[in-house]
Image (cartoon, grey):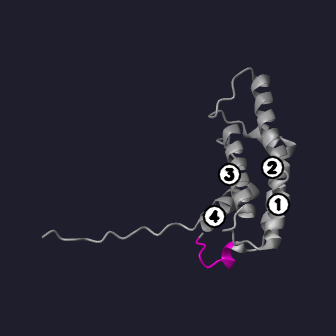
Amino acid sequence: MLAMTEIPCAEAEDRFVSTLRTFLQHAGAIASGKAEGDAFSWFLAAEYQWEMETACAWLVESPASRLSDADKATLRHFLGNMPEIRQAIVAGRREAADRNGRGAAPEWADWLAIAALPRWNDFTVRTAILLSQLGTPARNDDRFAA
């Protein structure tokens, strides 16, 4: 007779928790300047922006989101600026590549050019303001583990 062993099912991760965590990690890095540095490239700037925009949109639109209506309204306002920030990153990367006479490979780091973008600075400031406006949704949620 074969011994039957029960394999414990991995508990499915809560989508709200994982999305909020992703958003807060990226937002915290942008707002605190920890995303900056010599290794910060146009590719990474675009990735940070995309991750924040995607997570933010889910937190606003999903019925599974547990954010308050006020927090969702704050995020909607923040989302309204994302297309301009995305376009500024793309345009800045093209201009930097043209100016330097070389391709803008994803590995090419140029933090100074990214930091010089008025839209990136605006993104950083708006992100810091957003984090202060959101209050503490993560700490208010007993299923969120930072």
**Marking on residue 51:** 3
User: Closer to the N terminus: mark 3 or mark 1?
Assistant: 3
Question: Tag 4: Cα neighbours inside 10 Å, few (<14), some, or many (≥20)?
Answer: some
- The location of residue 133, given as percent across then percent down, is 82, 69
In the image, the segment drawn in magenta is: 138-145
Disc nearest the viewer among 2 and 1: 1
What residue do we see at 83% from left, 49% from top?
121
Q: From the image, tell me which residue sits under label 4.
A: 21
Q: From the image, tell me which residue sits under label 2.
A: 82
| In the foreground, 64 or 43 | 64
- The location of residue 143, given as percent across then percent down, is 59, 76
What residue do we see at 63% from left, 64% from top?
21
**Marking on residue 76:** 1
Contact flag, marks 4 and 3 (Cβ < 8 Å)? no
* Tag 3: amino acid: Glu
| In the foreground, 16 or 50 | 16
* Tag 4: amino acid: Arg
